[in-house]
Amino acid sequence: MKRRQFAALAAASLALPAALRAQAGTMKILVGFPPGGSADTIARVLAEKLRASLSQNVIVENRPGAAGRLVLGEIKRAAPDGQTLVLSPSGAMVIAPWLYNNLGYDPLKDFTPVSRLTVFDFAITAGPAAPPGDLKTVLAWMKANPSRANYATSGAGTVPHFAGQLLSQATGVPMTHVPYKGGAPAAQDLIGGQVPLMVDTASETLEHHKAGKVRILAVTGEQRTRALPDVPTLKEAGINMTADAYFGLYGPPGMSSDVVQRIDRAVSDALRAPDIQEKIYSYGLVPSHAPGAALASMQAAHLKRWEAPIKASGFKAE
């Protein structure tokens, strides 16, 4: 009798929708960067909220390597049960495909878009090696001193790399890209006077700007950044250019719509929480939820947008 009851219970469990069965396990959110950065911070505050709303354990695993691309090769092979997700910046999805002949994943086919989490732009920051004044003053100095017209970023082949190239094209100021292995070492050389300008996320230079060590001259978005209300956009500074990016939550290919919708609803609720919003804003990012279909559309649009400037630059990753 007990054996028949156990078999009946097992069969009933298998008959449950995948969205309910998934609640029994541990969800992993993979991050392709070391602990401490904006991607890792967002993943951890999100995981804390999802534990309660999804009634299951949610952990964050850091799998750094290749500017977030390495972990994408892992996620595409995971089971499509919603238990393994990745938090990825848009660069790995919309910039890298134009740079690598053997990327190891197809950004449009190998993943299930679940939720857009944030949008963000970039800060144009001057260090002590640049002259005093606004952005146009600094750019005029760079044009008059081409051997010193360098700008730092967190790495070659990143969105900031090509945002700097767009700035150079928009202003007619030849600028040499100086890539670093991360935003922190780039910011340190900016502070130290090794480079006069830096293009990267505001989070990399925000505290240094507040401390008076560097000056954020402009941001690249359509609107001013909440964390920097007194800093103009490039358009307000008289330069007709914008550049932005986003963080998205993705799963393996083949995830069912009920699983995606269950997770997306929980993400949407989490991003409305005031404490999460303040944490995201403090990094110079903007909480901006959108469901998987909207994330897919935005990704496709950004992929197309970056094709021409990247090809025009002639840059190819090794």
Image (cartoon, helix red, strand yellow):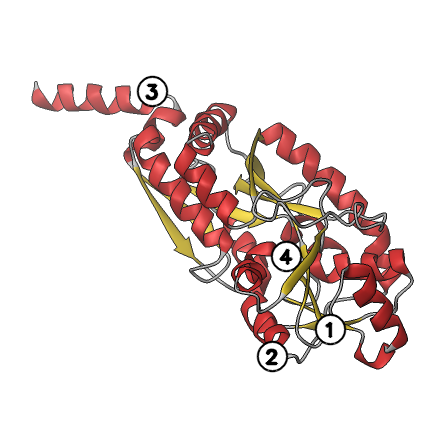
- Residue furthest right in the image: 172
Q: How many marks?
A: 4
Mark 1 or mark 4, which has the lower sequence index? 4
Q: Nearer the viewer, mark 1 or mark 4?
A: 1
Q: How many angstroms separate mark 2 from mark 4 (CA)?
A: 38 Å
Q: Position of residue 248 (x, y in %)?
A: 56, 42
Q: Which residue is mark 2?
A: 192
Q: Which residue is mark 1?
A: 130
Q: How many angstroms separate mark 3 from mark 1 (CA)?
A: 66 Å
Say what amino acid the circle numbered 4 marks: Gly
Mark 3 or mark 1, which has the lower sequence index? 3
Mark 3 or mark 4, which has the lower sequence index? 3
- The secondary structure type at the circle numbered 4 is loop
> Do the numbered discs 2 and 4 sit on residues whose CB atoms are within 8 Å?
no
Q: Position of residue 315 (x, y in %)?
A: 80, 66
Q: How many angstroms separate mark 1 from mark 2 (CA)?
A: 11 Å
Q: Position of residue 15 (x, y in %)?
A: 34, 20
Mark 2 or mark 4, which has the lower sequence index? 4
Which of 78 and 190 lies nearest the eye of the viewer? 190
Q: Position of residue 299 (x, y in %)?
A: 68, 40
Q: Is residue 169 above or below residue 283?
A: below
Q: Which residue is mark 4?
A: 104
Q: Residue at x 34, y 30 (%)?
A: 54
Displayed quadrant of residue 263: top left
